[in-house]
Amino acid sequence: MAPIHALLGCTLLALSMWHGRLHGAGPDRASRLHAWPSGMLPVFALGNQTFMNDSSGPHLTGLQENVFLRYFIFFLLIAFSWDLADLDLKVMSLLGDSRGFAFKNHPLLALWLHDRGKQLALVVFLAMVTWVWRPVGPWKQLSKDQRVMALIAVLASLLSVSLIKRYSLTSCPWELEVFGGVARYIPHWQWGVHDGGGGRCFPGGHASSALGLMPASLPFLVHSQPSLRKTGRRIFLLTSGTGLLFGLVQTLRGAHYPSHTLWTAVICWATGAGVYLALQRRRIVLVQ
């Protein structure tokens, strides 16, 4: 595993352990932790169940504030529709030919929106880590527990993309024979089928550097205060919009199909929201 993956994994493990210690220990600790699996609710299985947090922070009230499900379905429908229309290769054929992709090394795309964009995303992530212990702005209105859960959700989101990418056999568009490479086109749905290229192109890594930050909006989106819910929507729009922009940049350069970006959004939101829900459910069980 690459060093960055190991670092993210260790950070996620440490935060998870630290989060568990926030609630202390007691004689009924084992029985409470026994209820933990019941909190592993998938993002699409909330139904009408109501989750209420303690008075120190946000709450989650089933379908009334079910932004998790709404956004998940939104991303999922777009990604499925794109794949069903079979548009990936058609779009890439408009951007490249047998000589490759004209915008591959364009300074605006390769340097500023890719390299500098990746560095900016790292700065934002590190800032979010510091805000757990030294919050600024609206983060001050969240409990430390909520900030930790949001950070763990972001880490899980980023790790999920990295792990899938590590074992994916799908190669990037600029590796295809039709664009001057050696690989043949095989849809990313066909897992286990080699296309003759280097693989490890699906999902979109660069897009995930911003889309992986979407879970940072979760504690705000379900907060009882309207002003903080508005802040959550702004965070969600900023991170998702930036991620889609990063994905577009990589498509123009020939590095990723449009579907890679769309499925990256699905993976990041589903993983981040699922982990956040699990942690929220566990927190409620322990408080009760």
Image (tube, helix red, strand yellow):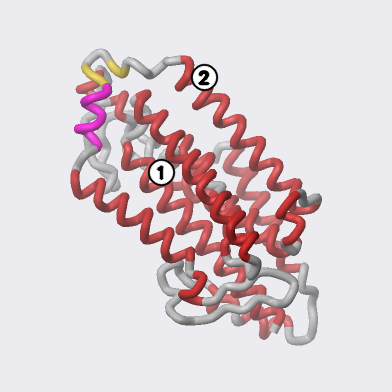
> Which picture quadrant has residue 270?
bottom left
Q: In front: 156, or 145?
A: 145
Q: In front: 224, or 10?
A: 224
Type of amino acid at the residue the image marks with label 1 = Tyr
Instruction: Classify 10 Å Cα crowding around label 1: few (below 14), some (14-19), many (20 and above).
Output: some
Q: Position of residue 137 (x, y in %)?
A: 74, 50
Q: Is residue 108 above or below residue 54?
A: above
Is residue 175 part of the magenta span, yes or no? no
Q: Position of residue 162 (x, y in %)?
A: 49, 43
Type of amino acid at the residue the image marks with label 2 = Leu
Q: Is residue 18 visible?
A: no
Q: Main secondary structure of the magenta part?
A: helix
What residue is rendered at 31% in x and 51% in y?
78
The stretch of residues the image draws in magenta is: 88-95
Q: Is residue 268 visible?
A: yes
Give the number of marks: 2
Q: Position of residue 119 (x, y in %)?
A: 61, 30
Instruction: Classify 10 Å Cα crowding around label 2: few (below 14), some (14-19), many (20 and above).
Output: few
The reply, left or right, for residue 149 in relation to residue 99 is right
Q: In front: 11, or 118?
A: 118
Q: List the residue tagged with mark 1.
A: 167
Q: Secondary structure at mark 1?
A: helix
Q: Is residue 286 above or below residue 81?
A: below
Q: Quick one: label 1 or label 2, which is nearer the N terminus?
A: 2
Q: List the residue tagged with mark 2.
A: 111
